Image: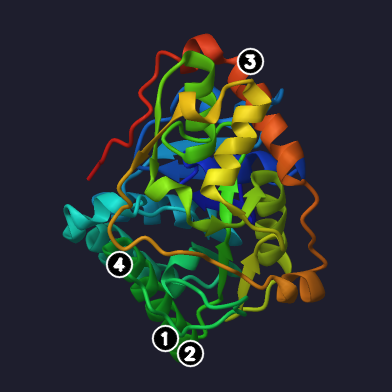
């Protein structure tokens, strides 16, 4: 493989869907993640025939296997690197913040310092997060005026600023994306949408932090991977692109929609819990730049996307019912 895509974090929800999207467009893809591939129910690239033809996977941890990763990079010579790898989860980052800084800053800086020396790399896409902005007042355009409120958000903001300095100093061809709350079939069960659906189907109680007052824009994964591919191919180095819908919903209203879809009373599903430390009230991302410059538009409404996700949950309910639904920290 030469001139293809290297997808770092290919086992993640967004990374695995991005691999699927690339394969559907005929691209050659090398995926790497620190964990072995999970069950195929969480790997949408395995949901299509002939997925092995243009895809290879290697288990690599950025914290420990950087030399091995760079050997692969020099062997495969990808023209594009798209990086989804990050230590996620906001609430848990308060418990051992050094783990988040190690993975999201130190390991990433080491990777970028090696990648910048490659003469065949055309574009590096860094998949960032709106958490770097903190709570937004109104709809914000792309910027680096960060006010992160958690260790997770601080670690992601630090990496974004580091990459901006590499672009300015070395011309490193980085493009940033920051997407709203992503969801869809195949998402990890500790996320609010699949968890609420699974609990509604299995009679379990869902703890709703702060009663679900936070406001979010939810965007379907199919729209997100389309935007990511456009940013990788046609995005301007140094630029940031927001990926978001123009609609908002409170977490409470979102769960209420799921209750209506599954025929479960809200009070039978939900237990109100304390809000988590440092939780931002809202992220409002103005996605006008990617619409105007790269011709992207979101196409899947929330109601349709929820129906697609519930169809996935129902199709695999016996298996999903046996799996843990809580986040398990790895370091």
- In three-dimensional space, the C-alpha distance between marks 4 and 1, rounded to whole angstroms, equals 14 Å
Query: Which residue in the rendered view is the most extreme toward the top?
Result: 318
- Which element type, helix, strand or loop, lies under badge 3? helix
**Front residue of this view, candidates 267 and 208:** 267
Q: Mark 2 = which residue? A: 168
Query: Residue visible at 40% across and 25% down?
Result: 205
Which residue shows up at 44% across the image and 66% down it?
Answer: 131
Identify whether 267 is placed above or below 85. Answer: above
Within-10-Å neighbours for mark 1: few <14, some 14–19, many 20+: some
Q: Earlier in the sequence, mark 4 or mark 3?
A: 4
Secondary structure of residue under mark 4:
helix
**Mark 3 lies on residue:** 315
Q: Label 4: which residue? A: 105
The foreground one among 330 and 138 is 138
- Name the spot of residue 143 as percent of width and height, x first: 54, 83
* Distance Cα–Cα, label 4 vs label 3: 39 Å
Q: CA distance from mark 4 to mark 2?
A: 18 Å
Residue of label 1: 165
Q: Nearer the viewer, mark 4 or mark 2?
A: 4
Q: Earlier in the sequence, mark 4 or mark 2?
A: 4
Is the Cβ of the residue at disc 2 closer than 8 Å to that at disc 1? yes
Mark 2 residue element:
helix
Residue nearest the observer in this picture, 19 or 177:
177
Residue 29 coordinates in the image, percent (x, y): 60, 44
């Amino acid at each position: 493989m030469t001139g293809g895509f290297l997808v770092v974090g290919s086992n993640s929800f967004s990374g695995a869907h991005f691999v699927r999207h690339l394969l559907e467009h005929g691209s050659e893809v090398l995926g790497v993640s620190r964990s072995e591939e999970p069950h195929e129910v969480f790997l949408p690239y395995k949901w299509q025939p002939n997925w092995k033809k243009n895809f290879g996977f290697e288990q690599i941890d950025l914290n420990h296997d950087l030399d091995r990763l760079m050997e692969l990079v020099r062997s495969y010579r990808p023209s594009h690197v798209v990086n989804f790898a990050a230590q996620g989860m906001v609430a848990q980052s308060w418990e051992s913040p050094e783990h988040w800084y190690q993975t999201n800053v130190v390991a990433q800086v080491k990777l970028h310092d090696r990648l910048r020396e490659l003469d065949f790399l055309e574009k590096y896409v860094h998949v960032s997060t709106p958490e770097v902005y903190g709570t937004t007042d109104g709809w914000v355009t792309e910027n680096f005026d960060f006010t992160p409120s958690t260790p997770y958000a601080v670690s992601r903001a630090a990496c974004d600023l580091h990459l901006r300095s590499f672009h300015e100093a070395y011309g490193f061809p980085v493009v940033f994306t920051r997407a709203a709350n992503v969801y869809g079939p195949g998402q990890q069960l500790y996320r609010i949408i699949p968890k609420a659906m699974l609990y509604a189907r299995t009679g379990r109680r869902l703890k709703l932090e702060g009663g679900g007052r936070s406001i979010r824009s939810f965007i379907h994964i199919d729209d997100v991977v389309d935007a990511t591919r456009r940013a990788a191919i046609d995005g301007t180095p140094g630029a940031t692109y927001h990926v978001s819908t123009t609609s908002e919903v409170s977490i409470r209203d979102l769960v209420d929609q799921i209750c209506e879809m599954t025929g479960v009373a809200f009070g039978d599903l939900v237990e109100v819990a304390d809000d988590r430390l440092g939780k931002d009230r809202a992220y409002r991302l103005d996605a006008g730049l990617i619409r105007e410059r790269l011709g992207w538009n979101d196409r899947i409404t929330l109601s349709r996307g929820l129906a697609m996700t519930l169809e996935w949950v129902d199709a695999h309910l016996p298996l999903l019912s046996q799996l843990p639904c809580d986040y398990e920290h790895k370091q």
